[in-house]
Structure formats: structure tokens, C-alpha cells
């Protein structure tokens, strides 16, 4: 029996919807997603256009102006904008026919984690995804690295906005100094990874090179390069020498983006995400070769993932993360935009709140990081909660839409024999085959 | 979302557990692990209790235990140095050279009651400044990331005495199992329950459906067992919050139960203070302190036989960075608390902070190895045999347990 249609919807996509028939030729359909123009994104509630940098800075000003007005924390202007942006994002995840593209967006957003755990970051995250991540998921990794590093969300999240070269004009005048955070995480998490063997001196030196990149709130400016905060002199990073100025920062990022250590790190992460928790070396080698031969074209890497047999050989090898579970369940149930808050709540209560990763390393990507005894029971409880909103749907129809031939006979039998439609739906969603992808 | 519904209505639980027992009997080998047979050991679990608190993100040891007596301290620490003991908002006296952060009043009380030992200039054996690598090694007990944690491997030497419906010897609190407690020895989990409860029979159906899944099957079994146990002890307690205070208090209560676990692990994040450190630490430390106080209170009499190790992956830079914070460093502080601890002292082979004394001219030089403390607890507190120490910390015989940490 051909399971590839349903497999593809889970493995590469966000899960099937009853109103979106699965394509007959999955690889071709997946590749087509990467070349066609993506559809429009939902707008945050109350907005007639996507918030721009000017708008976001105005929201920040409003927050400062209402600082002394008592109100609940989540109603403050920046938090309120973040909430609307999250809801719009999830509406898109529930509805989009371009599931593969969206999975890549979520993957790279996680690779370049910026978390609303830092209050200054929250209002920027919608813009961050729209301008730093989305345009580049089928393009160049270097472009994405530059765009994320240059974005206020990242500059605030990893403290770059307040890092000052100790020997810069500002550094000597005011007693301000270096903050290594962004420099370290770019090397460790975004590019080379510790396997490359860079040193503390490389981190410090790279942090010095990054000084000057900061955020100007005035007039809705956003990111600027402030020469008076930039550490003077040459900096040596991982054996390569860089000079002064913004163009040298960009040159360093583009250089890091095409190092083989970076390409290997990215290949391992992509294969772990799309193939198996334990990345098969042959598959890693294929993605790595693609990245090496294309100067880190991550669109080409995505096409390699679709083309290689490893991605198709072991259906259900991966476990869905809480977000993937919430999106797939609600899509399978035929949810509409009004169910976006349900998806947010389900993913959050299972430990994966949108834009709230604990650390700069982002959400973990292996089953063992998500399977806990309490957690699996809570998945069923959340399935029950979601099913309760669609309790007139036939459990067999849900199983057919989402799992097709991947559904095991015992799951279908248990769902058929369940005490109520709702219980039947719960069992389909809580079944091990649905928990996996 | 504030409404809490018990997960397993009392009427259903017994039948459910009976059903599960039947399942275990008919099941396969891995269920034998999930439901170990009762051993002949007459003393049951013994009285000693051990708790490990992991502070993720790297606590600044010099901020929580300030070496105000070191001549170089104030100049290096600048805005991070608090006033001396007795001054307004000053540190709390720890015997004339060190002072405790003023947010840690419960801990200070334990120190004065000789129930808290402060360990300073301490670190794991690794010298990485990556949070993720360091946490992996701290919990693995080896110089690379293993798939199991040292505490779990050590516990393999503990006699198996839990029956199918009782508590496991070890308990992890929180939504995630820390690497420290992952491994071959089955471990219970406790997390604040959330969400709405499906009918009890659905849990049994789920257990059936997940049975053949090597990952989800055992997890479902364990989840049901843990709830059966935990809901009995905690009963109708409010479970709102889920923060460290709640987890620590719950840990205390579960450990105090006669048939409770012997070992528990919990964690608290938020210690990565690259900016505005003084303000951020004030709240963080107060929360940690409140949790430690709740743990002590809830343990009641069992506290007498308890040792709590509070540790973090590494310390932070001695000098303040450009944002009134600190960056990733090396040596730091740890705490050992409990009635079994020979407390009331700061234990440190103090390396000094002056010229030429710092590790790589930036970090506190470590002079004590966290493994010495962990090995002492395993050998002298839990009374585990030598092979347990070897299993916990492979290839480290040169690092022995340390004298003077525990009473008697």
C-alpha cells in the first residue's frame, strides 16, 4: 500500500486538511511549493497592513507613554502586538496549503531563535519572521544569517544592542563594554558549532567585530551601525582577518555561512529534523554536499531532502513536537482561524509556547526531549480538549484524512468502539501513529 | 485555565490500575522494568533522602556568595559588589570573609542552624563555556554527552523495592526529565497536572494503543503509575503556578511520604545574567530561596535525613561586562543543605581574585570538583557501593569523595 501521500503530509508538511486533497505526486508537489510565490499572510487583528518597523517603534513609544497606567501585563502595547502576531502566525499554520514551506520557516526560526522571554524582543518577532526568515527559506543561508543578525529581535535577544567596543569612542567615554552573547551564539549555534574547534579568543574577537550593531528606536529607524561604538582595529576570527565597519561584519557573516563546519552543522540539523533523530550519515553527507557545492543554498538543501530516499524510507520515525501536534490535529479536524487560540494554548500547555524557547539553542528536536510520562498523558488530554470542539466529526473520517493507510487496525477499531464521537476522535489524535510523523 | 480537575476520578483509578496490572502480567520484558518485583529487603527504602537542584544558565557564584574579604573583590566586581554585612542591603554574614546575597534569607537561616554548607570556587571537571555542552557533561558525569545521567546510573545499585503501584526510588519534578535522571533505572515523574480530564477508560485504551510503541508505550505506563502515586499523596492540593516554589514544595511532600522516593531532581532556569545582573538576580535568588525553604518545611521530620545539592553548570566572569552583567566563566558556588549536612561553614580552598589568580585572567579559578561532592553523597549518604560511584562517574578514580561534608 502506498503510504507516501500521507507520509509526506506529516513528514514535510503540517498535516492534511479535509478541504485540501493530498497531491498524487508528493515529491513534485513539495518541490513546487519552493518555487511558487507563497500566499499572503493573515494580518494581526485590527491591522490593515503588516506592522512595519515604524509601527513597532510607535507601539513601543505607546508602551512608554502608558507606563504608569495600571493594566494587566499581557495588555501592555508591546505584549498585545506580540499576541496578535502570534495568533496571525498560527492562523496561517492552520490554513496554509504550503505546509513544507511553513515547516522550513518554523525550522529556521528555531535555528535562529529569538524569544519573547526578553520583553524588548516580543514586539519584533512578527516582523523578524516576515523579513529575516521567510524570504530566505528557499534561498541563501548567508542572506538569512545577515538578515537575522541585523534584526532588532536578535540584537535585543542576545544583548548585542548594548555591547560596546571598549576602545571605541563611546566605550572610552562612558564606562561601557563588550557583551559576548551574540558573538558566541552565532559561532556556536547559528554557524560553525563547537565541533569546529574555535577558541574563546575567536568569540571575544568576533564580539568585538560585531560592536556598533545596535538598535535606534527614534523615528522607527531600527538597526543601525554606530561607528562610535565599534571596536577599532583588525579582528581575527577562526583564522580569518577582518577589518572595521559594517561591511566587514557582513563579510564575516557571509564567510562564516559558507564554512564547511557550518554546512556540516546545518546538514545534521536538517536531517535530524526531516529524517530521523539519529541522522543517517549517508543522508547528512548528501545534504552537506549540496550545501558545499551551492555555497550554502538552503533551498537546494531542502530539495535534496525531498529527493533522497532516506526521507521516505521510515515513515513515523519522528515524534511530533507539541506545536506540530497541535497544528496537525486541528488541521485534521478542519479548524478555522477562530481555533488559533486553541492551538496556541495546546502547544503551550504541552511545553512549547510559540516564540518562547527557553534558550538561544531553540526547541529540542528529538523524541527523547519531548516524551515524558506526564507529557504523553497530557497529549491525550489536549487531544480530548480539541476533539471536544469538533465532536460531530466522524473519527473514521479524521483517520482517513490524516493517517490514511498509516492508521493501524487496532487504532481504527478502538476509535470505532469508543463511547462517543469525541472519544473516538481523541483516540485517533492520541494514537502513537498520530503522535509521530 | 485556573480550574483544576483531578485527572483520575477516584472511582476509575482502581479499576484502571487493575487493568494495567493485568496488562503488565501479559506484557513483555520491558513491562517487567516498568513494574519491578518487590525485593526481600526488610528495611524498605531506608531513611536517607537526596535532592539535586540544577540551576540552568550558570549562576554567578560571586554574586550569591560574595568574597568581600578578598582585597581584590570590590575593585573587580564594581557595581556587582554589595555592601558588607551589617550595612543597609548588605550581604548576610557567612563567617568573616564571605557574605550571602540578602535575598537568601531562608538559606542563611539554615546556615546559622548548621544545616547549610557553602561550597565555593567549585566547578565540574570540564572547561567549556557553552551552556549546552556544560549542562550535558554536568548531568552525564562524563567528559562527553552520554544518553544517561550520573544519578540514574548510580541508583542502579540501589535494591529494587518498589511494587507496581508504589513509588519509584527516584523522582523527577517538572514537565521534562533531566538528563541527570535519564537512564536504565526507571524514574517517576511529577508535574503540575493541567488541562481537562477525559473519561478514565480512555487512559486504558491509550495504554493499549501505545503498548507496542517502544518510546510512547513505557511513557504512558509510567505516566499512569506516577499519577496514581502522586495524586494520592498530594490529594486535592491547588496545583496552580508550576514555578520552582510549587515544584520544590511538592518535592518535599513526596519525599516525606513513608513510601516516597529516596532521590529527587528538579531544576530552575533563568540564571544567564549577561545584563542588568543585580536586578535580575534579586528576584531569581528570592524565588530559589523560597523554594528551598518550602522544600525544608514540607519535608518535616525527613529533613533530618536529607542532603540537597544545589549546583549550576559553571560560574561567570569575575569582572563586570559592558552591560552590568557577567559572561560565561568557570569556577562558581554550590550549596549542600539538609539535616544530614555538616553545615554552618563555607568550604573553599580559596584561589584569590588578585593579579594572576584568575583562570585565563577572567574567571574564578576552580579548586574543588563537583564530582567530589556528588561521590560523597552517593557513598556516605545513600551508602551506595564503590561500583555505583564508578558507574556514575566513569574513569575518575583519581577524584575521591571528600571528608567533612556530612555529619558523623
Image (tube, coloured by chain):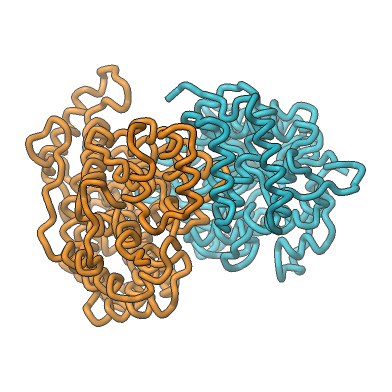
Q: Identify the colour of chain A in the image.
A: orange
Coordinates of residue B120 in the picture (x, y in percent): 64, 49
Point out the image quarter for the C terminus of chain B. top right
Coordinates of residue B205 in the picture (x, y in percent): 55, 42
Coordinates of residue B221 in the picture (x, y in percent): 62, 46
Q: Identify the colour of chain B in the image.
A: cyan
Asked if residue B311 is positioned above or below residue A274 in the image, the reply reads above
Q: Nearer the viewer, residue B25 or B350?
A: B25
Asked if residue B282 is positioned above or below residue A229 in the image, the reply reads above
Q: Nearer the viewer, residue B227 or B320?
A: B227
Q: Determine the residue positioned at 50% across, 36% down.
A: B284
Q: Determine the residue positioned at 37% across, 35% down.
A: A345
> Going by the image, does A131 lie left or right of B65?
left
Point out the image quarter for the N terminus of chain B. top left
Q: Quadrant of residue B103?
A: top right
> Going by the image, does A405 lie left or right of B19?
left
Q: Determine the residue positioned at 26% across, 19% down.
A: A68
Q: Determine the residue positioned at 49% across, 58% down.
A: B132
**Do we see residue A207 in this rendering?**
no
> Going by the image, does B42 lie left or right of B251?
right
Amino acid at each position: 500500500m502506498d503510504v507516501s501521500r500521507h507520509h509526506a503530509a506529516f513528514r514535510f508538511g503540517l498535516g492534511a486538511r479535509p478541504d485540501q486533497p493530498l497531491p498524487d505526486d508528493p515529491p513534485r508537489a513539495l518541490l513546487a511549493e519552493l518555487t511558487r510565490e507563497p500566499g499572503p499572510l493573515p494580518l494581526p487583528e485590527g491591522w490593515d497592513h503588516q506592522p512595519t518597523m515604524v509601527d513597532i517603534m510607535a507601539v513601543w513609544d505607546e508602551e512608554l507613554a502608558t507606563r504608569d497606567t495600571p493594566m494587566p501585563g499581557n495588555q501592555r502595547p508591546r505584549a498585545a502586538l506580540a499576541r496578535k502576531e502570534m495568533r496571525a502566525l498560527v492562523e496561517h499554520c492552520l490554513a496554509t496549503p504550503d505546509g513544507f514551506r511553513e515547516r522550513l520557516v518554523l525550522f529556521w526560526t528555531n535555528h535562529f531563535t529569538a524569544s519573547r522571554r526578553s520583553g524588548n524582543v516580543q514586539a519584533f518577532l512578527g516582523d523578524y519572521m516576515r523579513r529575516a526568515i521567510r524570504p530566505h527559506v528557499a534561498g541563501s543561508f548567508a542572506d538569512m544569517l545577515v538578515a537575522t543578525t541585523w534584526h532588532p529581535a536578535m540584537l535585543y535577544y542576545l544583548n548585542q544592542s548594548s555591547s560596546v567596543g571598549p576602545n571605541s569612542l563611546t566605550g572610552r567615554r562612558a564606562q561601557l563594554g563588550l557583551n559576548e552573547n551574540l558573538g558566541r551564539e552565532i559561532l556556536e549555534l547559528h554557524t560553525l558549532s563547537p565541533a569546529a574547534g574555535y577558541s574563546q579568543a575567536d568569540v571575544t574577537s568576533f564580539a568585538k567585530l560585531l560592536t556598533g550593531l545596535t538598535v535606534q528606536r527614534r523615528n522607527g529607524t531600527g538597526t543601525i551601525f554606530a561607528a562610535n561604538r565599534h571596536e577599532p582595529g583588525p579582528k581575527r576570527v577562526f583564522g580569518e582577518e577582518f577589518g572595521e565597519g559594517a561591511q566587514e561584519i557582513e563579510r564575516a557573516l557571509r564567510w562564516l555561512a559558507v564554512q564547511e563546519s557550518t554546512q556540516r552543522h546545518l546538514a545534521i540539523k536538517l536531517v535530524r529534523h526531516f529524517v530521523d533523530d539519529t541522522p543517517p550519515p549517508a543522508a547528512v553527507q548528501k545534504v552537506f554536499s549540496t550545501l558545499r557545492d551551492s555555497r550554502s543554498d538552503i533551498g537546494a538543501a531542502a530539495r535534496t531532502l525531498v529527493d533522497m530516499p532516506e526521507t521516505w524510507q521510515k515513515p513515523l520515525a519522528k515524534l511530533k513536537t507539541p506545536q506540530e501536534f497541535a497544528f496537525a490535529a486541528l488541521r485534521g479536524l478542519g479548524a478555522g482561524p477562530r481555533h488559533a487560540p486553541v492551538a496556541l494554548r495546546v502547544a503551550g500547555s504541552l511545553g512549547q509556547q510559540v516564540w518562547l524557547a527557553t534558550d538561544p539553542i531553540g526547541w529540542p528536536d528529538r523524541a527523547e526531549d519531548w516524551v515524558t510520562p506526564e507529557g504523553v498523558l497530557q497529549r491525550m488530554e489536549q487531544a480530548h480538549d480539541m476533539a471536544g470542539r469538533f465532536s460531530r466529526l466522524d473519527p473514521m473520517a479524521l483517520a482517513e484524512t490524516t493517517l490514511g493507510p498509516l492508521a493501524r487496525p487496532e487504532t481504527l477499531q478502538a476509535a470505532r468502539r469508543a463511547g462517543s464521537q469525541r472519544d473516538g476522535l481523541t483516540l485517533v489524535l492520541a494514537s502513537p501513529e498520530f503522535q509521530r510523523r | 485555565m485556573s480550574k483544576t480537575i483531578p485527572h483520575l476520578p477516584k472511582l476509575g483509578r482502581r479499576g484502571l490500575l487493575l487493568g494495567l496490572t493485568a496488562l503488565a502480567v501479559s506484557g513483555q520484558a520491558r513491562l517487567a522494568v516498568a513494574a519491578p518485583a518487590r525485593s526481600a529487603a526488610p528495611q524498605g527504602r531506608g531513611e536517607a533522602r537526596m535532592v539535586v537542584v540544577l540551576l540552568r544558565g550558570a549562576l554567578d557564584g560571586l554574586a550569591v556568595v560574595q568574597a568581600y574579604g578578598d582585597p581584590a573583590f570590590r575593585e573587580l566586581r564594581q557595581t556587582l559588589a554589595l555592601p558588607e554585612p551589617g550595612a543597609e542591603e548588605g550581604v548576610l554574614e557567612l563567617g568573616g570573609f564571605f557574605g550571602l546575597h540578602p535575598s537568601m534569607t531562608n538559606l542563611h537561616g539554615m546556615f546559622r542552624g548548621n544545616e547549610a554548607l557553602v561550597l565555593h570556587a567549585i566547578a565540574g571537571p570540564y572547561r567549556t563555556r557553552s551552556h549546552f555542552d556544560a549542562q550535558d557533561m554536568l548531568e552525564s558525569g562524563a567528559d562527553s554527552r552520554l544518553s544517561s545521567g550520573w544519578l540514574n546510573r548510580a541508583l542502579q545499585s540501589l535494591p529494587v523495592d518498589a511494587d507496581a503501584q508504589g513509588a519509584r526510588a527516584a523522582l523527577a519534578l517538572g514537565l521534562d526529565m533531566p538528563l541527570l535522571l535519564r537512564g536504565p533505572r526507571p524514574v517517576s515523574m511529577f508535574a503540575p497536572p493541567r488541562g481537562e480530564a477525559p473519561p478514565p477508560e480512555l487512559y486504558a485504551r491509550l495504554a493499549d494503543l501505545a503498548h507496542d510503541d517502544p518510546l510512547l508505550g513505557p511513557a504512558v505506563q509510567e505516566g499512569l503509575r506516577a499519577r496514581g502515586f502522586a495524586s494520592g499523596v498530594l490529594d486535592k492540593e491547588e496545583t496552580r503556578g508550576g514555578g520552582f516554589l510549587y515544584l520544590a514544595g511538592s518535592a518535599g511532600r513526596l519525599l516525606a511520604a513513608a513510601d516516597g522516593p529516596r532521590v529527587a531532581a528538579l531544576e530552575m532556569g533563568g540564571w544567564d545574567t549577561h545584563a542588568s545582573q543585580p536586578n535580575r538576580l534579586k528576584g531569581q535568588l528570592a524565588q530559589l530561596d523560597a523554594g528551598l525553604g518550602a522544600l525544608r518545611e514540607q519535608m518535616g521530620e525527613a529533613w533530618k535525613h536529607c542532603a540537597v545539592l544545589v549546583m549550576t553548570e559553571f560560574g561567570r566572569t569575575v569582572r563586570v561586562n559592558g552591560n552590568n552583567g557577567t559572561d560565561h566563566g568557570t569556577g562558581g558556588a554550590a550549596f549542600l543543605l539538609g539535616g544530614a549536612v555538616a553545615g554552618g561553614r563555607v568550604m573553599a580552598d580559596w584561589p584569590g581574585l588578585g593579579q594572576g589568580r584568575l583562570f585565563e585572567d577572567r574567571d574564578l579559578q576552580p579548586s574543588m570538583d563537583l564530582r567530589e561532592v556528588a561521590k560523597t553523597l552517593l557513598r556516605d549518604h545513600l551508602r551506595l557501593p564503590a561500583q555505583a560511584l564508578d558507574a556514575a562517574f566513569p574513569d575518575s578514580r583519581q577524584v575521591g569523595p571528600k571528608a567533612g561534608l556530612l555529619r558523623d
